[in-house]
Image (tube, grey):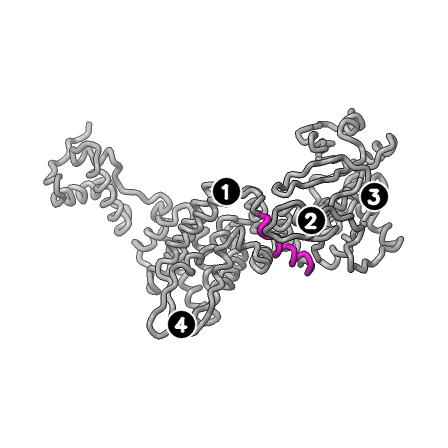
Amino acid sequence: MPVPHSTSQDPGDLGPRVPRPPQPVPSGRDPRPLGPPQLEAAARLLSAVSPAASELGARFARRGYELALVGGSVRDVFLGRDPGDLDLTTDAVPARIMEIIDGWADQVWTIGIEFGTVGMRKGSEIFEITTYRTERYAPRSRKPDVEYGTSLVADLSRRDFTVNAMAAKLPGAELVDPFAGLQDLSDKVLRTPGQPEDSLGEDPLRIMRAARFTAQLGFTVSPELRVAMTELAPRLAIVSAERISAELTRLMLARPVGGPRRGIELLVDTTVADVVLPEVPRLRLEQDEHFRHKDVYLHSLTVLDQAIALEPRYGLDGDLRLRLAALLHDIGKPKTRTRLPGGKVAFHHHEVKGAQMARARLTALRFSKDVVDDVSRLVELHLRFHGYGSGEWTDSAVRRYVRDAGPLLTRLNALTRADCTTRNRAKAQRLARAYDRLEEHIAVLAEREELEKIRPDLDGVEVMRILRIGPGPQVGKALRYLLELRMERGPLGPEQATQELLAWAEGEEGLGAADPPPAED
């Protein structure tokens, strides 16, 4: 059964798309054919992945059906990566799959059976078997009408990229690579099995997946795929925010230090970021004789790289909050840019504006409330270190810094250190020493005080008993005063705090001089 393809169209036009026949290898390609030794080596490599998968393949073959390892599972084997759960495909319909695996699988689940997928566990291995499919997409939806197919090659032609359009027929692990995916894997290039405008037009989320694979695998996109990403970026409007944020999260959590940067650069260069994360491309402020400044966009990408590199130092591993804050920490600058005398430029309170913008964008992308709160708070605090000047930090300043950061202290330290991108070596060394001194001061003070639990020496109940007042605004005012004392002088203890509270109350309107509190039994 043929797989529907379609012609290119105006990116803003979401109308009908005209089918185009599939092509086993994209036009203009000159794939290098694999010889028998290479095919044998590939079969040996693939067959070693899972003896259970080969056993299952033999079970299907005895009943006259095909079974193949497919998609990312095959790709990851060639990349030397653990393929994890294994994806399989077959010409058997779901009801027949259930009959074939009956008595073989230790556990079976059918949550995806209406889409042609049956899941199972054999020992410690997880398999998902999907019947060959063809898909037809409605113009304004990325949910296809699915029909079962009979051809492995046709099934592979609907995959997103050629590196994911390879299969290994089981049980012999014979490589099936009709779109030269292995060559593209070797060349580290992302291409689509058919025309890229058809593939991306049918399922625009593939635009985000291209950027994600660029980040995760270090691949580049082919010139024709890059053009299609640019032209079809507006079609991401039909994709849910949750789907986009899921791909953006995977992109940001890519393992290589420079991986997330590569993914973001691709989104910006293809104008996709204008649709999904417009605050980032707006950082590319024009430089002219009136607004001279460093490139904020490149600075933000460098901060992202440096934050990722610092994660091991701070006991962080793939920290989404830190990485998002590093990317977004300066997004308030375009809206706060002002011209100063002498041709200089300033961005007063850009951290406050940036925090508001980060909150709005991440909320629109349906990130969790915890992620939204933490990232926007980090953006708001990212200049706090510089607010205390270049001198020695007092104990009270350290307490305030730690209290403001709260549970985000480690991330704030990493972000603050990553935010130094100056090329002036002497200045960079001065800042590094200042960061070191602050962190040392925090550690020393933490040994004497519970910095992460800074609170007034008395609680609200004690304040009401001492001042002989009931609940009301004066209690909150008294607690704020005691907190200021705690910040300035450290722990006072209940007796000293009581004396300070009474002295404060004498001068406080509405309280007057309070009598000493009654002795406790």
Quarter occupied by residue 332: bottom left
Q: Secondary structure at mark 3?
A: loop
Question: Residue placed farthest to the right in the image?
Answer: 36
Residue 435 covered by magenta stretch: no
Question: Mark 3 = which residue?
Answer: 173
Within-10-Å neighbours for mark 1: few <14, some 14–19, many 20+: some
Looking at marks 1 and 4 on the same chain, the residue that comes earlier in the sequence is marked by: 4
Quarter occupied by residue 461: top left
Question: Mark 3 or mark 2: which is in front?
Answer: 2
State how far apart marks 1 and 2 are (Cα): 26 Å
CB contact under 8 Å: marks 4 and 2: no
Question: Mark 1 = which residue?
Answer: 366
Q: Is residue 56 above or below residue 235?
A: above
Question: Mark 3 or mark 1: which is in front?
Answer: 1
Q: Residue placed at 52% from the left, 48% from the top?
A: 320
CB contact under 8 Å: marks 1 and 2: no
Question: Mark 1 or mark 4: which is in front?
Answer: 4
Q: Point out residue 175 in the picture as x, y percentages from the top left corner.
A: 82, 47
Question: Mark 2 = which residue?
Answer: 199
Magenta: main secondary structure equals helix
Q: Residue placed at 88% from the left, 54% from the top?
A: 37
Q: Which mark is residue 290?
A: 4
CB contact under 8 Å: marks 3 and 2: no
Residue 299 vs residue 21, the one in the foreground? 21
Q: Amino acid at mark 2?
A: Ser
Looking at marks 3 and 1 on the same chain, the residue that comes earlier in the sequence is marked by: 3
State how far apart marks 3 and 2 are (Cα): 28 Å
